[in-house]
Amino acid sequence: MIDRQARRPWRDGALFVLGLGGLLAVELLLTPASAATDGGFVYGALFGCSVAVLLSGVFRATDRQLATSAISLGIGFGIGALVDLL
């Protein structure tokens, strides 16, 4: 469960924009076609970390929860991308 902290618009907004920017960068710089040949794990991991940062800004997660979710989603999306390639 995510423990919501007090609303901090600058921090939450910065996390949302950073996550959205990461998603755009991953989608524009690492296309799935190039990720299939270069390794889908990197593409999936970066995508998962970006989603975690974006959602941490939306749901006002603590710093520890941000780090935990970024690592967990990064690894999960990376493994999912590898399984999808097989």
Image (cartoon, rainbow, N blue to C red):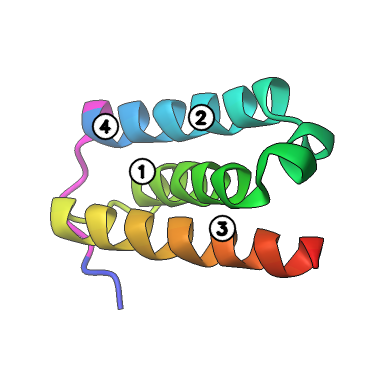
The main secondary structure of the magenta stretch is loop
Considering depth in this image, is 71 or 82 the residue closer to the camera? 82
Q: Are marks 4 and 1 in contact (CB under 8 Å)?
A: no
**From the viewer's perspective, is the residue at label 3 or at label 2 nearer?**
3
Pointer 4 or 2: first along the chain: 4
**Amino acid type at mark 4:** Pro
Pointer 1 or 2: first along the chain: 2
CA–CA distance in space, label 1 to label 3: 22 Å
Q: Position of residue 24 (x, y in %)?
A: 63, 26
Pointer 1 or 3: first along the chain: 1
**Amino acid type at mark 2:** Gly
Q: Which residue is mark 1?
A: 57
CA–CA distance in space, label 3 to label 2: 15 Å
Pointer 3 or 2: first along the chain: 2
Which residue sits at x=84%, y=37%?
Answer: 33
Q: Is residue 20 left or right of residue 29?
A: left
Q: Position of residue 30 (x, y in %)?
A: 68, 29
Vertical comparison of 9 with 41: above or below: above
Q: Which residues are magenta?
A: 4-10
Q: Which residue is mark 2?
A: 22
**From the viewer's perspective, is the residue at label 4 or at label 3 nearer?**
3
Q: Which residue is mark 4?
A: 9
CA–CA distance in space, label 1 to label 2: 13 Å
5 magenta-colored: yes
Identify the element where label 3 is drawn.
Answer: helix
Q: Position of residue 20 (x, y in %)?
A: 53, 31
Q: Quadrant of residue 57?
A: top left
Q: Which residue is mark 3?
A: 78
Vertical comparison of 28 with 73: above or below: above
**From the viewer's perspective, is the residue at label 1 or at label 3 nearer?**
3
